[in-house]
Structure formats: C-alpha cells, structure tokens
C-alpha cells in the first residue's frame, strides 16, 4: 500500500485505540477469572480451579488474535510499516494514567508483530523498554494493608489480619491457629528483638490462590529490617478454614513461588504494585519470574527477553552445549554466565524415538496447561530470536546446523533460531549423583535418589507418567529439588497399562531374546525399570531402600485408580515439618 493512502493521524489514533481496547478487554477477563478464585476456594471446587487455570493461560492468545483481526479489518493501512511510528506515539499518549501500562505495551507488541507479519527483532516500532513508569500508580484497590502489633497487640492483630480477608467460610479454631502462629514467630525471631517505632506488618490485600490453598503474603517491617512471611490457609473435611503453617525462611518462600508449579490466581488492579511488593521478599528473583508466577506469563516472557539482551550486551562468554548426555530429541545449549538453557527440536530423531516436531510441541503445551506440582519445569517458548553469531562456540554451531538446520537462519552477523524453548538451568541428575559418588558424600547421594523417587511418585499422583525415566531427563534445582524436563514421551497415567511380567512357562523362555508374552503399545512393566535406570548397582540399592514399592505394578495401578476416581490429592510446596500440629490434609 502506498504511503499516500494512509490517513494519518486518524488511522494511527484508531489503530492505537483499537489495540488498547483489546488489551483492556483482555485484562478485564483475566482479572475476573483471577478474582473468582476466592469463590472457588470458598466452595472447595478444586475441579473448577483446574479448569480456570487452563482457561486463563489461553486467554492472552485469543485476545491477541481478536485484536489483530479487528485492526486489519478496520484499518487496512495498518499493514504498512510507515504508519506504526505514529501508532506507537498515539498509544503512548493513551497510556497516561493507565493502571497496567507495562502489560498494555507487551500486548501492543504482540498485536503489531502479527499485523506487520514481521519478526519483532527487526522492527523498530515495538516497545523495547517500558516508556511509562509503573511506580506510584494510583488505584482504587489498596495493594497492602498495615497492622501495628505494638499498639494492637500481637494476638488481636493476627485475628484482625485474618478476618479482614473476608472469607465466607467459618474457621475451625482461630484462637488455636493464632496461638500456633505466635509460637512459630517466637521460634523464628530473636528472643530479645528490639522493636523500633515503625514496627508494622504489611499484608497484600489479595490472597494468592493455587490448587487447594490460599496464601496470605506479607512483610514484618522493623527499623531497616524486612522479614517476609506466608501463611497457607486450607479447608478441613467440613469446609472450615484453618491456618496450616507460618513460613518465614526465604528458601521456603521461594519454593512456594517456584515456576515448576501452577501460576497463582491473584486479584490485582495494579500488577506492578504487587510485583514491587514481592521484590522486597525476593530481591534476587528476576522480575520476569514474579510476573510469570502471578499468571502474567506473557509479561514475564517480555521481561526475560529484555534481561537476556542486556546480559548479552554486558557479557562476553560463548554459547556452548549444555552439560549432560546429548538428547535424541533436542539440541540443548547454554550461556555459562546466564542461568538458563535453550532447547531446539532436532529435524529428525535418533532411534528408538519415533516422535516428530508437532508431537513434541503438543507435549510442551500439555505441560504448560497441566498442574506441574513442583516437578515439571516451566518453559518459555520463543520464535524468531536473533543471537550474535560470534557468541556461538564453533562446535555448538556445527551441532545445530547438523541436527536442527531447519530451525536456523544466518542473517549478517546474527543467527536466527526460528523456534525454541527456554528454561531454568539445572544440574542433570546423573551428573549430580556422580558428583555425590565422587566426593559430595553419602547423604547427597541418598538425597538425590530419594528426590528422584519423590518426583516420580508425585507426578504419578498428578496423573503424569514421565515415559522416559532415565536419570539424564531429570534435573536438580538450586534448592536440591528434582524436576523432570524431558516431555516427548510423557503420558497421562490413566492412559497407561501397568502389568507384572508373566511367569515363564518353560525354562528356555527366561533366556529368549524376545519376550514370550504379548506387549501392547501402552503396556508398562515397572519391575523391569530399575535394571535400565541405574548404571551403578549401589544407586539401585539405595533407591529401593528409599522407595521399596515404587517400581511395582501394584503401586501404579492403585495410584491410577485413585486418579481415575477423581480423588483430589494435596501437594504441599513447603516442608511438612513447618505445618502446624492441627493440620488435617494428608499431603504429598
């Protein structure tokens, strides 16, 4: 389209207004489903919780597709690059006094790249940096509430703090719970703590809902010290509420906010204010991960990309192959100074893998929508990402071109990767165990094998069978937790058929090369797995000590029956030792 056919500034303002209307609709729906988490929690409708989680993940892409369609239909000139500097300027003026400006800019980028049909790394018309400050945004909803233990008294303050949540359910025994919280505080804080004049407790106004729990998140401010805390709230069998624990260690709080779990549902008028509060609790956690944990994964993805570009600008090390055994499905590489791995699907898979690119991508989508229960790594999916060619070690570039050539394009001094997944870097479990064997000690070895079994067991209760259980497909996080990250053979537990190995009728059957019994496509023989999984006999012996029944068909069939019956199991994302003695729910 010729530039003369563009009706600027009318078209520019119209396009900008249409995009912002699309974003406002998206966030209105996003906030509605997040706010309704309170009612779902009060009802104990855990099935609805799962459905809402999946529905919310899909919302963003639907609204973007709708926005692209509306822009193209209403403004044919929008496909022309020449219009977009004016569109961007008009959009900025409309964001003044907006309450989610950073999210609206990300939405603008999503729509613009699709309207222009242009890879975003080439376009100069996107928001590379936020142009609107997110500090001090005024809102009707308070972000947090202050309480004053020195004047209110600790016990009345805790009661008031809980009652202000305005949960519809009755409490099982709030007096008992309050006493338990006070005992836990006194255990954690110094006995002779000096209280400053400004001592206060700041509590976020919205609970953080996930699965079968609601988390009250806050800070104790005493002088220059800020002590974070979280209080999980759960139901008993009568749908009465009780406080389950008090968590004050940052490592435990970090476990709650792990991206290997489902995203929180939080009612936020100004998300940046909630993220700013959380930064006091997690000063070292990337802002991108905090947005993602709140269910704003597209904003998290945008901020991650900015962080990555900044890191590349300020670092000089090369991308190299990631540590561990090379995969048969992915080429995996990393930048040693950046704590992530980059995974590119290979053009063809080595035997015995018989999958394809489409199936692998579908598996990653399945994991994104599934309850990851702290045992499945979360991923960021990217397309058309340009990396500096000079930053690739020659052997890595050779491997990518040999195994994933269709995903690469050289353009000038850049390598463009057309599609990839990015996730937090972990230590492959097989490497972790070898290091433990070589000097880290018996307890480290036993911990790794215990966690390996815990991961498999908890995934089973979440209706997940990993498929390929080899140690190299599991990683150990910085907190020592084992997580599964190889999804191409993942299956729902209810799709599998777990069997015992039939007894041989004749002695010669025991030594036959081929099985003497029929095997269906979904048949799994758990008792045979240990002989293939553990390269060191001592590892197998320790594992069977820690998990004597895990590789029996009976365990898997029983778990399968419980899952198929719709039993709602509870996955506790903090140490069970932190739970108060009155906690009811049987936890995994």
Image (tube, rainbow, N blue to C red):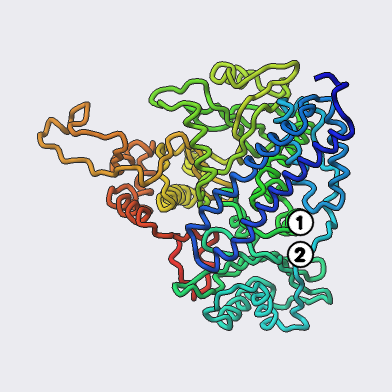
Disc 1: CA contacts within 10 A as few (<14), some (14-19) or many (>=20): many
Pick whichever, 277 or 65, lies toward us.
Answer: 65
**Considering only order in the chain, which callout, 2 or 1, is on the residue closer to the N terminus?**
2
- Location of residue 117 in the rendering, given as x and y in whole percent from the top left corner: 71, 25
Residue 527 in the figure: left or right of residue 236 = left
Inspect this view and state whether residue 470 appears.
yes
Pick whichever, 555 or 73, lies toward us.
Answer: 73
When asked about the image quadrant of residue 32, the answer is bottom right
Quarter of the figure with the N terminus = top right
**Mark 2 = which residue?**
141
Pick whichever, 44 or 471, lies toward us.
Answer: 44
**Mark 1 = which residue?**
270
Q: Say which element carries label 1.
A: loop
Task: Find residue 196 and name its label.
Answer: none
Relative vertical location of residue 363 with respect to residue 513 in this rendering, above or below? below
Residue 357 in the figure: left or right of residue 563 = right
- Asked if the residue under mark 2 is in contact with the one under mark 1, i.e. CB atoms within 8 Å, the reply is yes
Disc 2: CA contacts within 10 A as few (<14), some (14-19) or many (>=20): few
Quarter of the figure with the C terminus = bottom left
């Amino acid at each position: 389209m010729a530039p003369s056919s563009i009706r600027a500034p009318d078209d520019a303002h119209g396009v900008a207004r249409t995009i912002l209307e699309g974003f406002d609709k998206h966030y209105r729906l996003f906030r509605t489903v997040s706010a309704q988490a309170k009612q779902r929690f009060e009802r104990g409708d855990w099935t609805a919780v799962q459905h809402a989680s999946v529905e919310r993940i899909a919302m963003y892409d639907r609204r973007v597709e709708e926005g692209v369609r509306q822009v193209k239909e209403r403004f044919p000139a929008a496909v022309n690059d020449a219009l977009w500097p004016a569109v961007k300027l008009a959009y900025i003026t409309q964001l003044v006094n907006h309450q989610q400006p950073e999210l609206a800019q990300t939405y603008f980028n999503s729509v613009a790249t699709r309207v222009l049909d242009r890879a975003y790394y080439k376009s100069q018309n996107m928001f590379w940096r936020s142009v609107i400050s997110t500090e001090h945004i005024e809102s009707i909803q308070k972000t947090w509430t202050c309480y004053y233990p020195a004047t209110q008294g600790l016990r009345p303050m805790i009661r008031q703090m809980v009652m202000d949540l305005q949960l519809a359910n009755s409490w099982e025994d709030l007096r008992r719970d309050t006493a338990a919280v006070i005992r836990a505080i006194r255990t954690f804080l110094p006995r002779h703590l000096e209280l400053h004049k400004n001592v206060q407790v700041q509590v976020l106004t919205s609970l953080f809902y996930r699965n079968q729990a609601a988390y009250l998140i806050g800070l104790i401010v005493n002088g220059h010290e800020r002590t974070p805390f979280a209080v999980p709230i759960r139901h008993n069998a009568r749908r009465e509420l009780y406080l389950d624990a008090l968590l004050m260690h940052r490592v435990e709080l970090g476990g709650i906010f792990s991206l290997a779990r489902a995203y929180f549902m939080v009612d936020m008028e100004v998300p940046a204010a909630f993220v700013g509060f959380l930064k006091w609790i997690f000063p070292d956690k990337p802002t991108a991960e905090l947005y993602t944990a709140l269910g704003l994964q597209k904003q998290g993805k945008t901020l991650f990309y900015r962080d990555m570009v900044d890191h590349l600008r300020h670092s000089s090390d090369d991308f190299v192959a990631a540590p561990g055994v090379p995969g048969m499905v992915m080429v995996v590489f990393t930048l040693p100074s950046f704590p992530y791995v980059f995974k590119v699907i290979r053009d063809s898979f080595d035997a015995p893998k018989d999958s394809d690119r489409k199936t692998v991508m579908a598996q990653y989508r399945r994991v994104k929508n599934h309850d990851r229960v702290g045992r499945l790594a979360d991923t960021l999916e990217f397309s058309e990402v340009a990396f500096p060619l000079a930053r690739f070690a020659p052997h890595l570039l050779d491997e990518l071109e040999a195994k994933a050539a269709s995903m690469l394009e050289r353009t000038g001094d850049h390598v463009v990767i057309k599609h990839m997944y990015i996730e937090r870097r972990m230590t492959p479990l097989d490497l972790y165990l070898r290091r433990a064997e070589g000097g880290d000690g018996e307890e480290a070895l036993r911990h790794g094998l215990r966690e390996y079994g815990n991961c498999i067991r908890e995934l089973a209760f979440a209706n997940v069978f990993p498929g390929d259980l080899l140690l190299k497909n599991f990683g150990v996080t910085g907190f020592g937790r084992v997580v599964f990250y190889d999804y191409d053979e993942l299956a729902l537990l209810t799709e599998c058929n777990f069997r015992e190995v039939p007894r041989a009728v004749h002695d010669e059957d025991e030594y036959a090369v081929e099985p003497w019994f029929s095997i269906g496509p979904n048949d799994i023989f758990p008792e045979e797995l240990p002989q293939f999984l553990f390269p060191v006999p001592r590892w197998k012996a320790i594992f069977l000590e820690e998990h004597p029944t895990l590789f029996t068909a009976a365990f898997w069939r029983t778990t399968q029956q419980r899952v198929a019956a719709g039993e709602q199991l509870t996955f506790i994302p903090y140490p069970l030792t932190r739970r108060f003695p009155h906690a009811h729910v049987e936890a995994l």
